[in-house]
Amino acid sequence: MFSRERKIGEGMGCFCCYGESSVQKPVERQNNSTNNQYKEDDFAQPIPDASKVRPQNCVKEESKVLVNQPAVEKDADASKRTSADEESNAIKARKFTFAELVAATENFKSDYFLGEGGFGKVYKGHLQDSGQIVAIKQLDRNGCQGIREFVVEMLTLSMADHPNLVKLIGYCAEGDQRLLVYEYMPLGSLEDHLHGKAQSHFPFFNIFCIPLFFQDSAVYLLCFIFIDLRPNEEPLDWNTRMKIAAGAAKGLEYLHDKMKPPVIYRDLKCSNILLGEGYHPKLSDFGLAKVGPSGDQTHVSTRVMGTYGYCAPDYAMTGQLTFKSDIYSFGVVLLEIITGRKAIDETREGTAKNLVAWARPLFKDRKKFYKMADPALNGQYPVRGLYQALAIAAMCVQEQPNTRPLIVDIVSALNYLASQSYDPNIHQSQIQIPRSPSSHMFKGDKQQEPFSGD
């Protein structure tokens, strides 16, 4: 049982968990050493990031395939030519012919174009045989991202089955064509709704990485997006935000605790959380996914990849990837959901550019919590719910990874918040300072309120 409170700075409320404390010892997982059949190699090129935030100093490289499938241990050139073909027998998704996808997009007509990123272009498609609307990612054969990332995403999603992960419908690996076919997400990304609709095209940026963290330079592209936003879209209300946060956490929980082998997402950010009808969230873009540590291992050593502003500082400094690296990224996303601010915002001054750096001093003074609410909410949120959500986010972005909560505990807390429907017509939003919260615990399947206070 979680027997003591954990404080965020001075005066910060506790975040309560059930089961063994996530801060006492590394997570014990089944030994999956037989699954790690893919060798780490050094030939990969840095990969352009998929975010419109800059500077982005955590760079993508071509992903190393570490999944429970036959090994791909080719040299670089041979891997790029053959890896997708060699893995095709392991893919559970439908295999499309290139002609079928040409027909679905009317020969990749510009009217079907949705966006562009490091992988290549994304089109809306209409499958001729089923009538299904899909999103089709086409690998740029001259692009920066490699075949291996294509394979990683195919393998990860073909093995995954969860309502909060975007569904891979199929793929095409014909000749030198590489395409992925997904379910279409009509409401775009969480980033679109929090920070405004992104443009279809963005310039390249040549960004030199922070010398303290990295030695390589990187070239960045901005993300592809599956968007079809309705005109005059209203800002997300509090209930919808908590629903999205809880759903995204459930998707991450599936990757960490229920996939075999367990997977570290490594690229969790608002632009990778896509929204379906009813604002149902699904995690997407698994090209950087990595099998997590197993047995007595505490981490996986790898080149640093991801997005600046979302990368955990411990991972960025050491290259030691853990499940708690994803927890930090989730905390940044949750802060964005609560505050409406970007993870990195170059239009702001000083420490305000970095969302976590801006938030940390405010975490220490409960009287300032209300200042962190997104102005777009127009004061229409439950004060106690705001404080509880901020407490969860604060725990997630702790600098020390062993003090961050487990995803199962985050899911429990956010499920509770999502279940507490707020009606602005009934509940008047008042800016007030609640009494110091006392801890409660989730026990089994029975959810109890994790905090007390007015």
Image: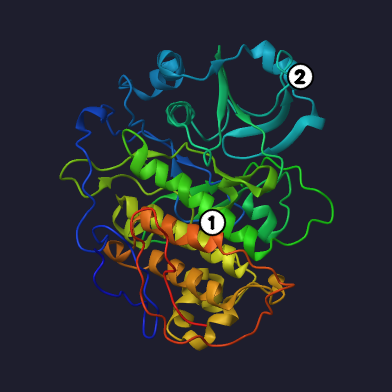
The quadrant where residue 109 appears: top right
- Say how the picture is coloured: rainbow
The quadrant where residue 382 appears: bottom right
The disc, 1 or 2, on the residue closer to the chain's N-terminal end is 2
Q: Residue at x 29, y 66 (%)?
A: 403
Q: What amino acid type should be assigned to the residue bearing mark 1?
A: Ala
Q: Which label was assigned to residue 356?
A: none
Residue behind mark 1: 245
Residue 214 in view here? no
Determine whether the residue tagged by mark 1 lies in a helix, strand or loop: helix
* Left or right relative to 340: residue 218: left
Q: Residues within 10 Å of mark 2 (few under 14, many from 20)?
A: few
Residue 93 versus residue 56 in the image, above or below: above
Residue 327: x and y, percent? 39, 56
Residue 130 in view here? yes
In space, the residues marked 1 and 2 are separated at their CA atoms by: 37 Å
Q: What amino acid type should be assigned to the residue bearing mark 2?
A: Asn
Residue 368: x and y, percent? 53, 85
Quarter the N terminus occupies = bottom left
Residue 100 versus residue 308 in the image, above or below: above
Residue behind mark 2: 107
